[in-house]
């Protein structure tokens, strides 16, 4: 068990109250204290930085700089200032040869001549990258891509590249790599990953377990399944993809390339579709994708920001093909235009355990859950999350499910203060009888 240590540090100036006691701590104990500061922090908890720790005492400074290279292996830059390049050099030097976790968020008003010197320092050690997350403008990335040719990143596990203002330039933002044998998680927003060949991109797509991809000017990894190189490669490998998040239009893959694409998606457990519209390719691609992922593997499905006829296309696809997702446990619908309960949903998702509605009118779903007290809808459902609805109806749903032996374990409701004010005894009953009941304000 990790030791729990309570430590008060005045971050404004070096400690002078008990310098002797602090400095007499064994080095092993000080290193444990340092390791606790690297534990992921919640949003409301601020942990001291490595530079704060070095100001506690001379002993702590020496310990951090000379004996704790892991403290310097995590580099985060969220704003630019004088001395930033020197700071990057210090982190690279003091972390010795440890793998690096790097996060850089470049403000949109930063110019390439400010960002490039820092990027060149980081680009000089690709062999040490373990995590690389960069958010910047297309203009900045184009400047990097034209100045640096990376051979490979053998330790890279997570690559997250997000580019903004892509519509402001006619050039294509890209990131060049040659070898990434350890890559497991890949996020590409507005940028294309470029390698030695089209076949290389297919190989990268097949090896990752998590893929989050947004449309770009150039064909992205999923479009490469319409390339002949995908056919031969698919015969020799096992798919690893578990989590796919896809933005905007759904790629159309057909003919002889449909087999490799189907195989590629067969291991998928989580699918999130974001910013889905009723484009011409979506009308064809979305039903195709639904059919391909209706496998015993898929456990979570999310529609996040769908507009136009996208939801209708989705439900029609479920109904027309009588699709069934036997293992699907979680359905999330967020900011979906014209979203309403559809008769195809219970048949498509018979094992549903969690239904989460966000920025969606829940009334039709509430009516469906109340429609037949003798045949409870989704008997495995234990978690229901929705917004601004009738607490009396929610109580009726909870009572019916208790009577049927399929009690709700979690009920999360975001309602306006006006709705909460008139909830009365129904709200009190839910607070008493639904163990996981939570309610908040969406005002």
Image (tube, grey):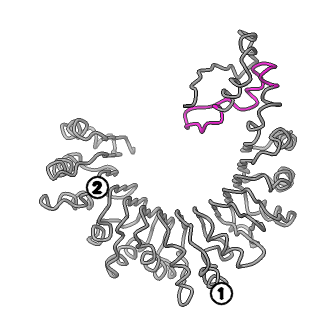
Element assignment for label 1 = loop
Q: Quadrant of the N terminus?
A: top right
Determine if the magenta segment contains residue 55. yes
Identify whether 75 is placed above or below 218: above
Q: Around disc 1, counting alpha carbons within 10 Å, would you say few (fewer than 14), some (14 to 19), or many (20 or more)?
A: few
| Relative side of 50 to 281, left or right | right
* Numbered circles on residues, count: 2
Identify whether 238 is placed above or below 386: below
Residue for badge 1: 228
Q: CA distance from mark 2 to mark 1?
A: 44 Å
Q: Residue 23: image x %, image y %?
A: 76, 15
Mark before the other along the chain sequence, 2 or 1: 1
Identify the residue at the far left of this view.
Answer: 374
Identify the residue at the far bottom of this view.
Answer: 255
Residue 116 at least partly seen: no
Question: Residue 70 shows which numbered tag?
Answer: none
For residue 341, what is the image quadrant? bottom left
Q: Residue 51: image x %, image y %?
A: 76, 30
Element assignment for label 2 = loop
Determine if the magenta segment contains residue 359. no
| Relative side of 310 to 340, left or right | right
For residue 147, what is the image quadrant? bottom right
| Relative side of 337 to 112, left or right | left
Camera-side residue of 308 and 381: 381
Q: Quadrant of the C terminus?
A: top left
Identify whether 332 is placed above or below 197: above
Camera-side residue of 167 and 325: 325
**Range shown magenta:** 36-62
Residue for badge 2: 381
Q: Are marks 2 and 1 in contact (CB under 8 Å)?
A: no
Q: Residue 378: image x %, image y %?
A: 25, 60
Q: Residue at x 21, y 59 (%)?
A: 367
């Amino acid at each position: 068990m990790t030791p729990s240590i309570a430590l008060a540090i005045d971050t404004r100036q070096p400690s002078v109250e008990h310098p002797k006691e602090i400095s007499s701590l064994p080095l092993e104990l000080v290193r444990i204290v340092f390791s606790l500061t690297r534990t992921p922090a919640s949003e409301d908890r601020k942990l001291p930085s490595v530079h704060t720790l070095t100001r506690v005492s001379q002993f702590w400074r020496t310990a951090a700089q000379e004996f704790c290279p892991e403290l310097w292996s995590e580099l985060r830059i969220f704003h630019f200032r004088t001395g930033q390049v020197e700071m990057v050099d210090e982190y690279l030097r003091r972390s010795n040869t440890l793998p690096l976790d790097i996060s850089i968020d470049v403000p949109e008003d930063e110019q390439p001549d400010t960002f490039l010197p820092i990027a060149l320092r980081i680009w000089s050690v690709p062999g040490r990258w373990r995590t690389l997350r960069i958010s910047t403008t297309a203009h900045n990335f184009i400047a990097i891509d034209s100045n640096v040719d990376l051979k490979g990143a053998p330790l890279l596990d997570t690559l997250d590249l997000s580019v903004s203002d892509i519509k402001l330039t006619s050039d294509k933002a890209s990131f060049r790599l040659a070898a990434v044998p350890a890559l497991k998680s890949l996020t590409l927003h507005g940028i294309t990953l470029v390698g030695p060949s089209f076949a290389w991109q297919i190989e990268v797509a097949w090896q990752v377990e998590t893929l989050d991809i947004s449309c770009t000017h150039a064909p992205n990894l999923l479009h490469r399944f319409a390339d002949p190189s995908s056919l031969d490669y698919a015969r020799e490998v096992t798919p690893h993809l578990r989590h796919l998040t896809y933005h905007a239009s759904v790629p159309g893959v057909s003919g002889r390339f449909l087999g490799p694409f189907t195989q590629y998606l067969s291991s998928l457990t989580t699918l999130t579709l974001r910013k889905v519209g009723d484009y011409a390719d979506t009308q064809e691609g979305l039903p195709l994708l639904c059919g391909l992922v209706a496998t015993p593997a898929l456990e979570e499905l999310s529609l996040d920001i769908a507009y136009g006829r996208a939801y209708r296309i989705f439900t029609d696809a479920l109904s027309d093909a009588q699709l069934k997702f036997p293992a699907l446990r979680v359905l999330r619908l967020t900011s979906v235009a014209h979203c309403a309960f559809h008769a195809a949903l219970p048949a498509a998702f018979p094992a549903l355990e969690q239904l989460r509605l966000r920025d969606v009118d829940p009334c039709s779903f509430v009516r469906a859950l109340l429609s037949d007290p003798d045949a409870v809808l989704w008997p495995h459902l234990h978690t229901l999350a929705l917004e601004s609805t009738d607490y009396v109806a929610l109580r009726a749903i909870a009572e019916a499910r208790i009577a049927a032996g399929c009690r709700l374990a979690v009920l999360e409701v975001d309602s306006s203060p006006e709705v909460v004010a008139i909830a009365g005894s129904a709200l009190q009953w839910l607070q008493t009888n639904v163990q996981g009941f939570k309610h908040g304000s969406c005002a």
